[in-house]
Image (cartoon, rainbow, N blue to C red):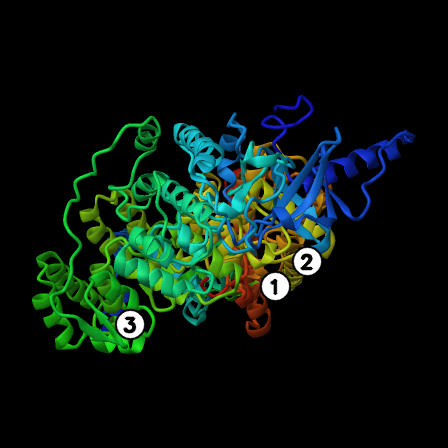
Amino acid sequence: MAKKKLKKKKSKLGFKGQLLLAATVIMGVVFMASAVFLMIAMAPTFVAAISDRSKEKLRSFSIAFLNFAGAFPFLLDLVTTNHTIDFALKTVSQPATIVIIYASAGIGYLINWAVVGIVANIMVQKAEKRVNAIEDRKAALKEQWGPEVTGDVKLDEDGFPIEMDSIRPPA
Amino acid sequence: MKDSHTPTLNSRITRSVLAEKQDEEKAQNTEESNGKIKANKPAPPPENITMLGSDIEIMCDQPMPQYDSGDIKAYAARLKSGKSCFALICENFLVPRTFLTSKFSQLANMNIVRIVASGVTFWPPEKRQRYVFVYEDTLGNKILPPDQPQAMGMKQERLMNAVIKPLVVLLLELRDADLIHGGIRATNIYDGNANNFENIILGEALSAPPTYHQPSIYMPIEKAICPPYARGISNFSDDIFALGVTILTLMRQEDPFADMREEEMVRQRVEHGTYSFFTTHQRTTGPLMELVRGLLHDDWQQRWTIEEVLAWMDGKRLAPKKQKTARTKAVRAFDYEGYKIIRPESFAYELQFNPKVAKDTIVDEAFETWIQRSLSNDKITTDFHDAKHSAELHGKDGNYPDRLLSKTITTLFPGAPIIYKNLKAMPEGVGYLAAYLFGNHANTQALEEIIKYNLVAFWAKIAEHTGTETQNLKQKFESAQANTMHKKLGFGVEGNLYYLCPEAPCLSPILNNYCVRSPEDLLMALDDLCAKTKKTDGFYDKHIISFLMARDKKVIESELMELNSFEVHKSKAALLKIFSNIQERAGMRGLPNLCRGLLVYLTPLLERTHDRKKKEELKKTAEGIADNGSIPKLERLINNKKSKKEDKTRFINALREYKSISDEQAHLEHQLTNNPKFGFGTGFEVAAIISGIITALVILAATFLQYSKGGIF
């Protein structure tokens, strides 16, 4: 029941989201030609966004950026020369155009693949180094403060180990 | 009389010889280390000589049995000036009357033995400390040695001039000085090395509890029933009574009691009264008998005072005092253990001998009927009912018959000692009794019960009718009763020993070979013990703590709760504080042996520093302080609250850091092991940033080209 409620909440757009959607729809209607062009040109981004299951959708970002970079010169041409649906369809239906746009999306994918590989490797090495540094620090703490600093030993109010021989029977 | 060379008041020994020995050793070591050994250093005394202070030599191999005071043995002593003395070597458990030494030494009277000094000395024959009294050896011979028949046949006129007059003057001086001698008896009078008793001298009575050396015949009936060690603080009328018996003893031609058992003598005194008892057995007539009659009155209120004695000596005829009430007598005798008893006091006396029969008798209806009908004394009847009622207050447990018997004896014989189980003691003597029992390693259960059941309160209630002042006694024993309820250190039966007998030295088994009379003595004894036995544990027990509680509450009271703590480190810290208080307040010299022993004992405390480096530093500093023997410095170092707090704060921070980095480590290790996509998130972020930058550049370039050349395409 609680899960269902949570799902319901997640699927619901917030006020900001709703405002953005409304603005996009209005903009789409106003700039119909650009919208049609982008709908076709940004297809790899939509695919990447749908296939990226991560919450942050970071993978689709780099594809989206490069995809847009590929589409931008044609979009600029469309907007500045003949901003009609026909011209938009004509531009996007040219093989060279679509290859350039989709190839730039591919470059985005490649950048993503290569950078992630390199960065992840660096991160693993850094983490291993950190683990070693922690081990050293823990050893130093133990040497200075004794095994009770680990928190594994039962301590009294002053922080000293409670040992049975430190308790004596009543006089 | 007063010898200018004789050290008296000013030279009274207040410090133990042990302390001086150690001071000397220390001084010697310092001199040796400076390479300045004095050529004329005094040679140590031979083994058969022990020193009291630096002026008095006591010859351990020269006993002087003529001056023995009962069990207390006398030895020859001499002052540096050459004056002959004798020393009485006291026992710890027979608590000597040390508090009175100063007062006795101030007496100017020539007819009492002169005290030279007193204090603690090392007694070589037993290799332990003993308290000693040193007196001038001017006594001569006993006028009536104890091993001879107790009769002298002195003419009454001579007796009057040679013995009674000097003794009465002495008694007057004692009374004015608020002193009670407690040892006036024929066998304690000396001829003072003069012929014809021209200079009689009364012997000592300070070396044991009050009246300890007095045979029962010299004591009023109530105290005669009591063992000598439990008679307690005597009063002036006891001395007057003893004077009466002394006069009778010196007057008579032969000893009528030579073959009579002490028990039988007391029995007859209880039955007939002391004066009648004496006159029955000793036919003496003459003018002195009027004096003797006045002195030997069993009722202390009827007994003559010293002023009355003086008045009689001046020739005044004294009208007999009005007796308050006649002694109670039963109309019908009660058959008990072969005796036909008509006096309640006699019944009380007989009840002590066979407790089993006694207990059966007092619960029997016949006994109650005898009290009610034959004695016909409303007070005794009421008191007996009270006795039964109060004995039941603690329930009818196994001790009920003993309680009832004790209270019945008190009812029948007001003022008689408290008799409970195998113990007999006057209320003021309970403390001395405790010292005696502990000193002899005897069972103290019955003593504890006397206090626990507050038998003294009942005794006081009954005794009030005899005019005895009991308010202080009641308050004292109420506190003692509260003490028995606690089993903690400082309380219990040991606590009561020192509370009820403040003169008692510490009777702790730890201090068997020492005579510890003050907190300072305690530290010095422990220092010596540590030097000899390398002692590192067992610095206190119930006796030591109770002793300190009674002697110097200030040094211990604030630490008592911690001392009783179950946590060892707390009790050890408290002990350190107590010892520190004693040494600091008394300004004592260094006690390196005790300090070194304490250092080992206090290891758990030294371990209570979290920072290992600081702990090692602390230990080294502590060792340095221990070598100097300063317990206060050691205490300040170990119990330093500021550094402890700082150490704790830093430890808590370290604890938090350890936990935090442990969590981080666990997280990283988990990620590295179980997450194949570790670092991907960051990778995506970096890739997005790079892509974003490229896109921005492309947009800028495209825009620039579009507007600079008239279009990209």
| Residue A101 badge | none
Mark 2 and mark 1 in contact? Answer it, CB < 8 Å. no
Residue type marked 2: Asp
Q: Residue at x 33, y 53 (%)?
A: B279
Provide the residue designation for mark 1. Answer: A120
Q: Position of residue A4 (x, y in %)?
A: 24, 73
Q: Say which residue label 3 marks.
A: B399
Residue B63 locus on image (x, y percent): 70, 50
Q: Quadrant of residue B677?
A: bottom right
Residue at (65, 37) in percent of width and height: B137
The reply to whether residue A106 is visible in this rendering is no
Query: Are tags 2 and 3 found on a single chain?
Result: no
Residue extending farthest top: B4
Q: Amino acid at mark 1?
A: Ala
Mark 2 neighbour density, 10 Å: few (under 14) some (14–19) many (20 or more): few
Q: Which residue is mark 2?
A: A136
Residue A10 visible, this orientation? yes
In the image, is B281 to the left or to the right of B548? left
**How far apart, in angstroms, are the residues tagged by discs 2 and 1?**
24 Å
Q: Secondary structure at mark 3?
A: loop
SS at badge 2: helix
Between disc 2 and disc 1, whose residue precedes? 1
Which chain does tag 2 point to? A
Q: Which corner quadrant holds the N terminus of chain A? A: bottom left
Nearest the eye: A81 or B585 = B585
Residue B359, x across and y down, in percent: 25, 75
Marks 1 and 3: which is nearer the front?
A: 3
Q: Nearer the viewer, residue B65 or B458?
A: B65
On screen, B75 above or below B382? above
Question: On what subunit does the disc labeled 1 rest?
Answer: A
The amino acid type found where label 3 is placed reads: Asn
Local crowd at mark 1 within 10 Å, few (<14), some, or many (≥20)? many
